[in-house]
Every structure is written in structure tokens, then in C-alpha cells.
Amino acid sequence: MASAEVVDAVERLRGVAVVTPMLTSTEVDTLAGRTVWVKAENLQRTGSFKLRGAYNAVACLDAARRAPGVIAASSGNHAQALALAAHLHKVPATVVIPADAPAAKKEAIDALGARIVSYDRHRQRRDEIVQRIADRDGLTIVPSANDRTVIAGAGTVGWEMLQEVHDLAAILVPVGGGGLAAGMALAASGHHVKVIGVEPAVADDTLRSLRVGRPVPIPPPVTIADGLGHTEPAKLPFEINRQLLADVITVSEQAIAEAMAYLWRYYRSAAEPSGAVAFAGLLQAADRLPDGPVGVVLSGANVDWPAYRSLLDIAMQRTERETDAAAAPVLR
Amino acid sequence: MASAEVVDAVERLRGVAVVTPMLTSTEVDTLAGRTVWVKAENLQRTGSFKLRGAYNAVACLDAARRAPGVIAASSGNHAQALALAAHLHKVPATVVIPADAPAAKKEAIDALGARIVSYDRHRQRRDEIVQRIADRDGLTIVPSANDRTVIAGAGTVGWEMLQEVHDLAAILVPVGGGGLAAGMALAASGHHVKVIGVEPAVADDTLRSLRVGRPVPIPPPVTIADGLGHTEPAKLPFEINRQLLADVITVSEQAIAEAMAYLWRYYRSAAEPSGAVAFAGLLQAADRLPDGPVGVVLSGANVDWPAYRSLLDIAMQRTERETDAAAAPVLR
């Protein structure tokens, strides 16, 4: 039985979040030597699982607290998610992003009706700015991971997976701040399924922290999985993950790009690098998984076309199989 | 109430076909001036809606008829669909494809365990070959559209759409042989929803045929929507479409490529050109649609990466919007 917080979030998200499908491929099953279910959460509104946590967080605020609006610092998926969550609740959203963030990201946030506040990331501290505006305008800060309601919202991904497939032996999930992994772990509580986190090898802050039992910082990582480039796990999800995660696997940058190519080839599904990390874990560490069917969370799709094209061009070449199909008989 | 054939097909496909999601985008809703639901049938197993018809057809055969196997002529989505449908029923499939078909297509069919028979498309007649092998080996021919059970299977796409969204005013659906459109029309019978077919303007055999009330041939069309390049509507679906389709819209080649770019941009969803045709219809002929929410069938995703990349590169440039977001205030 999933934790009550997750079940409550499921109710709040009904009719709001897309119940994303579980994709299968006979070719991937053969490659992995087991049944593989890919949870296509890249099809979620705003292009990532983040909508679930942001919406649940806003929904959990009482009306008086919610009315003045919500605020977050993020130039990524959480920003878009919070903008839509606020829009759906008819309250204002403020998003604090670096002045040099890509125009496309600003546009996407702007299109969802959020107020954008830019800052100079070389000279100003993001969290101080957020706090200052929140205090001044009476806004509620919605963190991207370090919040119980955000974690529970993310957990609804796992709830849906376990509703649809009853015999999953493991679920692979990308780990950045750790909110999604923690939510999945809460969703899986009481089920016989191991929740396994996957991190870029160059951004292994959660793995290192789990080894010593407390959050420890790493130097700012450089990874194509920009959504997972955290320097330290968030406190609240870390506490949950420390108790409930079965394992953490790390994957190379190359494996992440190759996973994007495989996701295209076998599912025609577009993953951003962060979103492909769990699939990379499947390809790279199948021997560390328990026997039985495996679920893999494809967590997001927010990558620009030029970046996607460049990564796929390279990865496609690397993963191209030899054409070894026997010459077909020609009927005479 | 959908036709009984479609409802029966829904039961047969339970647990076999992916219940594909309906995607939404606030930006597309704004562009189209209405709520738009995109049925992401490109996520179906084998990459297109064709699995539904092929599986339903094989399932409807009695065991003795089914045992020797099934056969079809197709180098496209129907071939892959029939190969998987036969595999799932544990009977052999034979697929007749031109000797010069792309290696990737042969590989995909081969990987699903079907026997491939090649022929010289300049010197041999496809349908004669199919008939000869079927007679010799006792196989059942499963047409890609001209079969009642194939049409009913395709209709389950529409059944799912109408189950999920109750107030659709119209459904846009690509038209090639006409099987999908006919199936959708059967699924919609008794509902207040107009089923509208969309064809490439250069492959408007169904529109021309509907105008004169009987199937009329057109010269072999050249269209990027290769799955819709029919010279004549199939008889059985045409009869249904003649009675039940509300309208047929045609779209330019350029509009099809642009639709692929929009589907990427707003849904990160990969459509093959044939699969994007209905979305092109939405963009090009919104004024011919009834008021109210519209469903759009994204019917397939089977396009090679190099072809997809080339088409998107061009279409992305054409559809790029001016960045007109007002400069965001910098907090001082």
C-alpha cells in the first residue's frame, strides 16, 4: 500500500496530470533479457514529471495562503510546472531565473503566464532573491524537491506504474535533488518492488551521501543531464531515500546519450538527457537488477531541437547495429 | 453508442494494445482557439495504430483457420503490425515486400519473427504473389484496410478517445486506404461528434471518390506521407466513409512537415509524415471545424532518424516564432 500522502496526491491530480502510458518493446525486452516497462512521463503536461509535485504543493496550500501567489527559483522543468500549477489554481506565479538563461526557456515560462524575475548569477544569490521577494509579496516558496507535498506529487508516477503492472521487481528512476526517487519509494512502500536510483557518474552526490549517511556536497558537476547536476541532495528526499532506496547506479555521459538514441529507436520517444538517465541505468547495469519485470521512468522531454539533434546524431552512429538479417528469399 | 464490432474489438485488444494517452498543450489550445486533444497513437506497439486492426483480424479467425498462418503485402506499418499480431497468437506470419525496401524495414519485420518474401516490384505483381502463397500454404490474407475486422480494430482508437473526453465536437483522422477513418466513424456512431478525414492534397483519392460516390483511381501520388499514398480508396472502408464521414480536408506537403515540427515543439512527440497529417488539418483548416473541443489522431511514428531530422530541420526554421517576450525585469 502506497503512503497516504501519495494516494491523496493521486486524487488531487485526477483530471490535471496526464496518466502517462507504459511503453513496451519486444526488442528492448530481448536486449534486457526481461520485460521492460517505460513510463513515458516525458509526455506529461509541461514536458516533465515536475507538474505533479508543483500542482500538489499548490493544491495543499489553504486558500488564504495560496491567493497572493507562489515563487520558485528554477530555469528548468520545475519553473514551467509551477507556472502551470499556479495558472490552473488562478493564482500568480513568480519564477526567478538567471538573466543569461536561454530565450526558449523564458518564452515557455512566459507563455504560461508567470512573472519572470532575472538575476545575475555571477553576482547575486538565487535563494536570497527568492526569500526577499517571497517576504515582500507574501508569496509561498515551492521548492523543486525539498518539500513533502512536492515529493508526494512526484510519487504519483510510481503509484500509476504499480497500478498498471503488478509484478514489477524493480523501478529505475533518475536522481537529481532526489524528490522523484523519494516519491517513488513512498509509492512503492508495501509493494515487493525495489526502487533504484540512477545518477550521472559525474553528478553522484546522492550515492556519495548515502555512503556516509548524510548529505555531502560535490563540486558543481558538468553533465549533459543538466536537470540532475546537483551539488548536494535535498534534505527531505535524502532522509526518505536513505531509508527506502534499494540501490543507486551511476551511468556515464556516453551511456546517457546512447539511451536517448535507444529511446528514439525503439519507442520513438524524445527524452531530454536527464529524462534518459534511468534507461541508461537499465542498459548499463542490468546485472545489478533483481530478476523479473522492470519499470523505467522517462522523466522529461524538455530539450531544444538543435541540442537533441546533435546528441542523437552522435549516439545513433555509436549504437547502430550491423544489418545482419539474412537475405530474404526472392520468390521466383 | 459505438458499433458492436468496435466494442468487441476493444475487449479483444485489452492487455494487448497500449491505451495511448491524449496529450494537451495550452499553447496549441491558444493557437487553435479551442481545446485540442492529441491521441498519441504513435506510441502504440509497432509504432502505429495498425496493430489494432491486424490483431483483431487474427483474433477473429477460428483456430483451424489461424493455425497455418497469415499473410499480407506491406513494407510499412501493417507488415510490422501483422508480424506482432501473429507472434502474439503463436502462428506464423508471411510478409511480402519489395526487394528494394529499406533494410531497416526488413530488420524490423524480421525482428518480430515474420517470414519475409521479397519480389521485384518492377516485374512482379504484389497481389498475385500474395494470393499464390496464400493458396499454396493455406494462409489467410489480412488486408491493411479492406476488411471488416481490421476496420473495427482501428476503430478502438476512437472508442478510447470518446471514453476519455465526452465533449469532442470533431475528430480529425488521416485517410489513406480509409480503414482508420472508417473505424473511427463506426466508433463515433451514436455520438455527437463529427469524424473528419484529412488527406495530402496530392493524394486526394478519397475526396475525389466521395465527390462522385464511388472509388475512383488517381495517378500514383508522390507525398512525404508515404503511408497515405494510395491511388484508390479500399472498397469496404469507402462504403462506410461515404455514409459516415462528415468532411474531408486536404493539406499541403509543407503543412505536413510543419505539423511534424509543431508536434515536436509542443508535445515532444515524433510523428511520421502520415501520422502528422491530421494535425496539419487542424492547423490549416480550423475554420472548417465545428465549435468545441477537437481530437486529433497522431497515427504513427515509423520514420527513420535521418529522414525525420531532415524534415524537422527545414520545418523548424519555417515555424520558428519571433522571440517577442518582453525583456524581464532584473531585480536590483
Image (spheres, coloured by chain):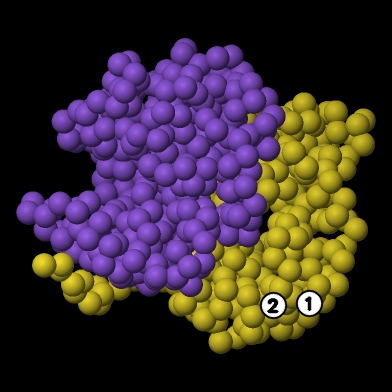
Chain colours: A yellow, B purple
Q: Is residue B106 left or right of residue A329?
A: right
**Circle 2 Cα neighbour tier, 10 Å, few/some/many (<14 / 14–19 / ≥20):** some
* Whether residue B246 is situated above or below residue B80 in the rendered picture: above
Residue at 87% x, 62% y: name it: A3
Residue A118 appears in view = no
Q: Position of residue B258 (x, y in %)?
A: 35, 32
Q: Is residue A110 left or right of residue A71?
A: left
Which mark, by number, is residue A192?
Answer: 1
Q: Are marks 1 and 2 in contact (CB under 8 Å)?
A: yes
Q: Position of residue A330 (x, y in %)?
A: 15, 68
Q: Position of residue A259 (x, y in %)?
A: 46, 67
**Residue A80 found in image quarter:** top right
Residue type pointed to by label 1? His
For this rendering, which residue is in front, B306 or B180? B180
Residue B119 appears in view = yes
Dot placed on the residue nearer the N-terminal end, 1 or 2: 2
The residues tagged by marks 1 and 2 sit, at their Cα atoms, a distance apart of 7 Å
* Whether residue A47 is situated above or below residue B290 in the rendered picture: below
Residue at 45% x, 70% y: name it: B67
Which mark, by number, is residue A169?
Answer: 2
The reply to whether label 1 and label 2 mark residues of one chain is yes
For this rendering, which residue is in front, B63 or A248? B63
